[in-house]
Image: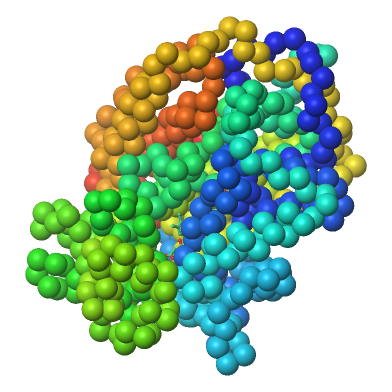
């Protein structure tokens, strides 16, 4: 429940939509476009409408489109990367719906690269075939633009940026009675321009809030990836699963000024090699002699981490300069331009890279229709654990998951429309007992602290001791953050700090519950992989 006191009943001015969607990335906008054919939809977004990870995606979207490839190949590759923790029925569902998702995006105007009349397919780690559909090396921006344009033009969709959602509205917030039911009726959201808190209600709510990557000091994710949806769902009573499965991308640019620029896996897919700058060795041959640079991400990230630690390096090199310069510029025009601006010519020089947090595999537990544990609440995209990724996400499977589950959640709501009641009147947010913060520095200090200990203690290689240290710090900070939250008016920074800390707690608790090494969860205390794969499910 929200830490704020809830005041006397007041009519909400924001009850005039059927479905509320939190998040305007690939998952949220896909759901909105399907729902809008039959009902009125409002999409809320923190900051701008293109502030999520979708806009930053580089490599592309995985789909079986080549005659030599099969659904079974894509399913097998997904489950090998996921170290057997995936739910096969989810994997089948997503893989089999991929070609249709690509067809719909092309229809919306996404200008996928094509060659000789067919879509150009690139290759990434863990994929046994070329199957990544892309728009140069900036696929996400093209997808975000097309989805946003369609949503902006749809008369049944209202887009509301500048709203930071704080908590879900449930039976506990009903005005007339204190029903205590777990049903979700919408969200309380901070209007970032006015500083007031609005109650947005609807018959159904979909969380599409993206990941929690910013819980780590080094991450490729945008600033707003603070696990808000996961934390909100957890506080309202929904289970979360496999939060220990945090993916680290092997190749983030190492640069003292530019902290989170990704060098797409497609660079390795098109021939890029990883080299130890001290010894000049192509070191992947010592870690995965067969798949080399195209081994799944957990394997490559751990190999780089091991080289960095063993040789006391700051970074390793990613080198594609042996390929023709035109080929490199043609395939990676955006990365090429970005690096040239930083004084690196990737057609002639190696790129310094380090691993960085990249993707949150765990999240709110959902079924094949995007339903969470709570009636009236759905979720889709990176904030969920659908069973697709298991212990490690296969490259370019996540945008795909957003399209398939955004669509599935929307269709389930429409098919069961008669079961969704109109929302009751809910209590207004009460600020009568809070004041403006007098020490914003507390927020900054705690943000930095969380991100640093999560990187050092809950990173690529874990131990029981490190996890205990992290748990201890989380416990100490929780008191301080809750106290601060209870006394001061909310701001986006404070809301994010509270959610970041909640996400950190869920990650550490999940990591402590897994007594084996599997996929992304690698611990020196339990190096073995158990014969049976089990999800880590946390119950509120
Ligand atoms: P996002 O696109 O992250 O959108 C989240 C939305 O929720 C935003 O609108 C945000 O404002 C909103 N939001 C969050 N919190 C709140 C709140 N409290 N209140 C209101 N709104 C809120 N995947 C691939 O498949 N292929 C790739 O090539 C690829 N490349 C990537 C490259 C980078 C650099 C990164 C970071 C990720 C990449 N990924 C890729 C992963 C993929 O981009 C994401 O998993 C996917 O875009 C997530 O989409 P989403 O809709 O779930 O969330
Ligand atoms: C990349 O382009 O390397 C990112 C692909 C992904 O995260 O799926």
Residue 418 against residue 499 in the figure, above or below: below
Q: Quadrant of the N terminus?
A: top right
**One can see residue 12 in this view:** yes
Q: Nearer the viewer, residue 269 or 196?
A: 196
Q: Quadrant of residue 244?
A: top left
User: Looking at the image, what colour scheme do you see?
Assistant: rainbow
Q: Residue at x 60, y 24 (%)?
A: 195
Residue closest to the eye, 522 or 41: 41
Quarter of the picture holding the C terminus: top right
Figure check: 487 above or below 192: above
Query: In the image, is residue 400 above or below residue 488?
Result: below
For the residue pair 77 and 382, the one nearer the viewer reads as 382
Residue at (26%, 40%) from the top-left corner? 456
- Left or right: residue 202 versus residue 27 is right
Which residue is located at x 78 percent, y 13 percent?
9
Question: Measured from the top left, where is residue 327 in percent x and y?
Answer: 38, 85
Percent position of residue 89, x then y: 63, 60
**Of all residues shown, which one is farthest toward the right?**
418
Q: Position of residue 167 (x, y in %)?
A: 62, 28
Quarter of the rendering containing residue 102: bottom right
Furthest residue in direction bottom, as rendered:
116
Which residue is at a point 52% across and 25% down the rendered structure image?
491
């Amino acid at each position: 429940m929200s830490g704020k006191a809830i005041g006397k009943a007041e009519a909400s001015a924001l009850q005039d939509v059927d479905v509320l969607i939190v998040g305007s990335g690939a998952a949220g906008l896909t759901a909105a476009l399907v729902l809008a054919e039959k009902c009125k939809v409002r999409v809320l977004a923190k900051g701008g409408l293109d502030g999520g990870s979708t806009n930053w995606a580089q490599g592309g979207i995985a789909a079986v489109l080549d005659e030599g490839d099969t659904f079974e190949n894509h399913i097998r590759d997904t489950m090998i990367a996921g170290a057997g923790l995936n739910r096969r029925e989810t994997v089948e569902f997503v893989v089999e719906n991929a070609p249709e998702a690509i067809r719909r995006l092309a229809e919306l105007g996404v200008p996928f690269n094509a060659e000789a009349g067919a879509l150009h397919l690139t290759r990434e780690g863990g994929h046994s075939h070329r199957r990544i559909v892309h728009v140069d090396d900036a696929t996400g921006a093209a997808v975000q633009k097309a989805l946003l344009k369609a949503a902006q033009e749809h008369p049944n969709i209202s887009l509301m940026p500048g709203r930071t959602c704080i908590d879900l509205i449930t039976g506990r917030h009903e005005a007339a009675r204190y029903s205590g039911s777990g049903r979700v009726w919408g969200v309380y959201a901070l209007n970032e321009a006015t500083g007031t808190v609005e109650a947005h209600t609807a018959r159904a709510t979909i969380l599409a809030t993206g990941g929690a990557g910013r819980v780590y000091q080094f991450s490729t994710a945008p600033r707003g990836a603070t696990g808000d949806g996961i934390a909100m769902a957890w506080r309202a009573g929904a289970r979360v699963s496999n939060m220990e499965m945090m993916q680290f991308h092997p190749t983030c640019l190492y640069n003292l000024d530019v902290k989170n620029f990704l060098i797409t896996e497609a660079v390795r897919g098109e021939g890029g090699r990883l080299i130890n700058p001290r010894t000049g060795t192509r070191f992947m041959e010592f870690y995965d002699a067969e798949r080399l640079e195209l081994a799944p991400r957990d394997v490559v990230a751990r190999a780089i981490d091991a080289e960095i630690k063993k040789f006391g390096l700051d970074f390793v090199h990613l080198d594609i300069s042996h390929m023709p310069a035109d080929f490199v510029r043609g395939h990676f025009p955006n990365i090429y331009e970005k690096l040239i601006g930083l004084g690196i010519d990737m057609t002639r020089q190696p790129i310094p890279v380090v691993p960085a947090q990249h993707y949150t595999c765990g999240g709110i537990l959902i079924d094949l229709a995007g339903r969470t544990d709570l009636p009236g609440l759905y979720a889709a995209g990176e904030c969920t654990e659908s069973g697709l990724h298991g212990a490690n996400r296969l490259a370019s499977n996540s945008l795909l998951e957003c399209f398939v589950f955004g669509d599935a959640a929307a269709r389930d709501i429409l098919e069961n429309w008669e079961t969704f009641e109109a929302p009751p009147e809910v209590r207004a947010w009460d600020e009568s007992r809070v004041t403006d913060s007098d020490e914003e520095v507390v927020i900054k200090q705690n943000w930095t602290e969380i991100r640093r200990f999560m990187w050092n203690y809950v990173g690529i290689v874990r131990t029981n001791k490190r996890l205990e240290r992290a748990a201890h710090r989380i416990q100490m900070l929780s008191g301080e953050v809750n106290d601060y939250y209870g006394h001061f008016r909310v701001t986006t920074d404070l809301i994010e700090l509270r959610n970041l800390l909640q996400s950190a707690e869920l990650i550490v608790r999940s990591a402590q519950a897994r007594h084996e090494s599997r996929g992304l969860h690698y611990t020196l205390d339990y190096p073995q992989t158990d014969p049976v794969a089990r999800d880590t499910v946390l119950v509120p």
